[in-house]
Image: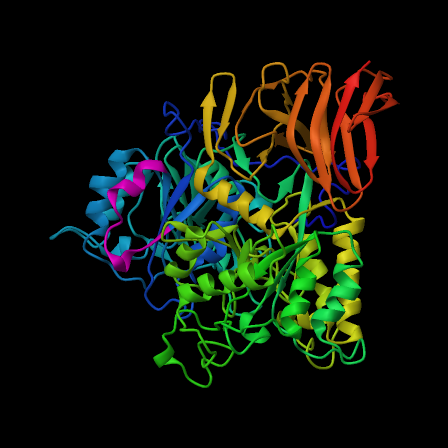
């Protein structure tokens, strides 16, 4: 895989990425398959993933290959993943209402269950969804009707899609020839050819497109197609998908972005993209409350919180989302008068560029353990369970910590906005439901590294995960304590997170630029130096849009829960995107037709990717083969509210704690323009390309640019 690092659009003008190629054999359908639900009111955006929960990770119910390897690329192509453990019985039939595809990721050892085949054949198949089978057929190989051969039911199932199958298997790779339709899509981080077997289905008609063909040199068996897609979905069998690996050994073989786009009929379809805002990659810094009361050697033994306030929060014109652990501030939840630590927390929270957040009352480590199940090695909470005036429960950790911050620490007119999950960040459903009930947001979990030690895109986590009907929003990268030596001999080790942030923000943006820290990052000069380097690069120097963590959480929530996309004859309807204000079109050479589109604020092209900026939660997008000149926002490094564009100009409320940058386009070359900022008028002139670059001081103001 070619890896492009650096800021989101650093090389956009100098080089364009190669167009993604999807294999198609003679007579097969073209890569842009029509949707299986083209006549529906909207495009179905959910994927129902069937997994075998037996023997998966004990501490995290979502620890499986779908969550760890498939969910992120599915999110990126616009899909929302709903997991279902086959050991819990059949999924409710209503789950299929908005499902585009049923995906399985089974292993060779997964065992059959009685309901699976009847549900697939009698419930799922009649609903018109697509089917994608990854890694191994698992229990589908072993299940059959009474008196049938073991794989007869699987053979009949694949025949529905125009695939032949007989269960034949030849261990390889000796004597096996391999043909790859597009080699670079099948050896992304490693080539599994040396481990290939001769097995799997074969395309029996022209409905399907083989990506891999295996054949025996002896000619004793027919060709096999272990990776194949069609208007019905797709099959990708091991070893062609991935080597999940242990610890640092993971490697992706198949380009799952290209595979899912083809298997799900999504080529050129728009995808919500919560990691971008107004043409720029989001940046946010959030601070877990650990180490608030620790003493720092960087400044005469003061609290780390005081050092963080003086040398970080007050040193940067950046938004920070900052949390506290209530148990680190007081030993009594009903304390009568504020103590020094509480007053310091309030002092931090008075800063307008600090967003208030909670890190719990007692900082649970193992959220899924009951107190009676705790051990010395597996404690439930990190602070004394004897905190006065408090009874521990997962819901109380949310409710009582937020109430304490709102009532005892928040300045007038401010409140706690975000719950930052603690410990293993595996809160039970009742804790997440409490956040929702209180009208707040949640972030944390899904931490990862993608660097020379964890050298695979397969480590990158998805946007978040459904816990019941609630969404847990994942962080954008790992924090300091994931780096060996941070607490001992290499206090500046956290600076290496910049590789992960680089890699997840190349031409394909997978995550926001997230600097995720704790108060103990102010514990000594080495840690502080690393933090300053990260904030300067990603918050100040790079082309990012700094926001609070709640802004990103709102964007993920909109992308995962409410966003709807409908295909029209002349374009697309984007509805209910909520806080997600970017839609991305991949492999799209066309241009926005501004005269027929509605609800847009702007657009930006990077190579073959077109990013459109929504003025609000809903918009209509019409594309044209010809560029139409029209005023619009190309990029801005901050929030734009109440925005609108017309044939004569652009207007929006511009707000930022830092210097505000706006790049506008679509004007006539050298056009005379009038810039109005809160009523103050200034003359401008568009450049030879009809663009204008505006820089404003920090603050909030109504900005209008009109043609004179």
Residue 90 covered by magenta stretch: yes
Query: Where in the figure is residue 357, as x and y percent of width and height?
Result: 58, 59
User: Please, which residue is most extreme toward the bottom here?
Assistant: 376
- Of residues 427 and 305, the one nearer the viewer is 305
Question: Magenta region: which residues?
Answer: 83-98
- Residue 74 visible in the snapshot: yes
Q: Give the vertical position of 247 relative to 157 (above or below).
A: below
- Of residues 444 and 216, the one nearer the viewer is 444
Which residue shows up at 63% across the image and 41% down it? 276
Query: Where in the figure is residue 453, as x and y percent of width and height?
Result: 65, 67
**Left or right for 451, reference 372:** right
- Residue 241 visible in the snapshot: no
Which residue shows up at 52% across the image and 50% down it? 463
User: Please, which residue is most extreme toward the left here?
Assistant: 147
**Left or right for 337, reference 568:** right
Residue 171 covered by magenta stretch: no
Q: Give the vertical position of 504 relative to 58 (above or below).
A: above
The C terminus, quarter of image:
top right
Q: Give the vertical position of 491 relative to 89 (above or below).
A: below
């Amino acid at each position: 895989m070619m890896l492009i690092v650096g800021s989101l659009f650093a090389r956009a003008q100098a080089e364009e990425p190669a167009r993604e190629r999807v294999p198609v054999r003679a007579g097969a359908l073209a890569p842009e398959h029509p949707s299986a639900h083209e006549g529906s009111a909207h495009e179905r955006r959910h994927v129902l993933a069937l997994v075998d929960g037996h023997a998966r990770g004990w501490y995290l119910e979502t620890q499986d290959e779908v969550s760890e390897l498939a969910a992120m690329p599915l999110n990126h192509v616009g899909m929302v993943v709903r997991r279902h453990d086959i050991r819990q019985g059949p999924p409710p039939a209503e789950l299929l209402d908005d499902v585009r595809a049923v995906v399985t990721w089974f292993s060779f050892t997964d065992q059959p269950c009685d309901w699976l085949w009847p549900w697939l054949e009698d419930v799922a198949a009649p609903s018109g969804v697509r089917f994608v089978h990854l890694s191994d057929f698992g229990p589908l190989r072993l299940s059959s009707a009474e008196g049938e051969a073991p794989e007869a039911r699987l053979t009949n199932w694949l025949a529905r899609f125009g695939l032949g199958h007989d269960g034949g298997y030849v261990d390889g790779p000796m004597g096996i020839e391999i043909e790859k339709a597009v080699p670079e899509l099948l050896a992304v981080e490693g080539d599994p050819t040396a481990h290939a077997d001769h097995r799997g289905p074969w395309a029996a008609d022209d409905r399907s497109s083989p990506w891999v063909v295996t054949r025996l040199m002896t000619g004793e068996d027919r060709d096999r197609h272990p990776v194949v897609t069609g208007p019905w979905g797709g099959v990708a069998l091991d070893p062609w998908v991935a080597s999940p690996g242990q610890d640092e050994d993971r490697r992706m073989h198949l380009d799952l972005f290209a595979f899912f786009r083809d298997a799900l009929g999504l080529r050129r379809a728009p995808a919500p993209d919560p990691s971008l805002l107004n043409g720029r990659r989001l940046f946010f810094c959030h601070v877990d409350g650990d180490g608030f009361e620790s003493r720092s050697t960087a400044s005469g033994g003061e609290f780390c919180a005081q050092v963080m306030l003086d040398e970080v929060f007050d040193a940067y014109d950046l938004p920070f989302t900052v949390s506290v652990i209530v148990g680190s501030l007081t030993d009594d939840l009903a304390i009568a008068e504020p103590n020094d630590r509480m007053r310091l927390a309030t002092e931090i929270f008075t800063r307008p560029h600090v967003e208030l957040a909670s890190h719990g009352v007692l900082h649970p480590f193992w959220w899924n353990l009951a107190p009676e199940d705790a051990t010395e090695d597996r404690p439930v909470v990190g602070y004394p369970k004897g905190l006065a005036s408090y009874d521990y429960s997962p819901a109380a950790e949310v409710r009582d910590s937020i109430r304490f911050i709102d009532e005892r620490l928040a300045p007038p007119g401010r409140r706690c906005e975000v719950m930052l999950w603690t410990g293993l960040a595996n809160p039970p459903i009742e804790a997440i439901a409490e956040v929702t009930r209180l009208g707040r947001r949640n972030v944390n979990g899904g931490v990862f590294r993608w660097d020379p030690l964890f050298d695979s895109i397969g480590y990158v986590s998805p946007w978040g995960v459904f816990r019941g009907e609630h969404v847990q929003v994942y962080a954008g990268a790992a924090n300091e304590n994931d780096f060996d030596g941070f607490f001992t001999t290499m206090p500046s080790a956290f600076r290496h997170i910049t590789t992960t942030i680089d890699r997840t923000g190349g031409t394909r943006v997978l995550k926001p630029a997230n600097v995720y820290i704790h108060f103990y990052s102010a514990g000594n000069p080495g840690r502080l130096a690393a933090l300053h380097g990260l904030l300067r690069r990603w918050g100040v120097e790079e082309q990012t849009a700094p926001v609070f963590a709640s802004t990103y959480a709102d964007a993920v929530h909109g992308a995962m829960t409410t966003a709807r996309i409908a295909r029209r004859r002349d374009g697309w309807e984007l509805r209910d995107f909520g806080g997600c204000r970017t839609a991305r079109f991949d492999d799209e050479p066309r241009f926005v037709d501004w005269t027929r589109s509605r609800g847009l604020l702007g657009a930006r092209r990077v190579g073959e990717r077109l990013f459109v900026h929504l003025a609000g939660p809903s918009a209509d997008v019409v594309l044209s083969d010809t560029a139409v000149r029209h005023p619009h926002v190309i990029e801005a490094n901050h929030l734009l509210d109440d925005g609108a564009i017309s044939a004569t100009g652009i207007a929006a409320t511009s707000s930022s704690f830092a210097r505000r940058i706006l790049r506008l386009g679509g004007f006539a070359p050298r056009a005379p323009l009038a810039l109005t900022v809160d009523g103050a008028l200034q003359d401008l002139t568009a450049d030879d390309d009809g663009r204008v670059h505006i820089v404003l001081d920090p603050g909030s103001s109504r900005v209008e640019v009109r043609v004179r």
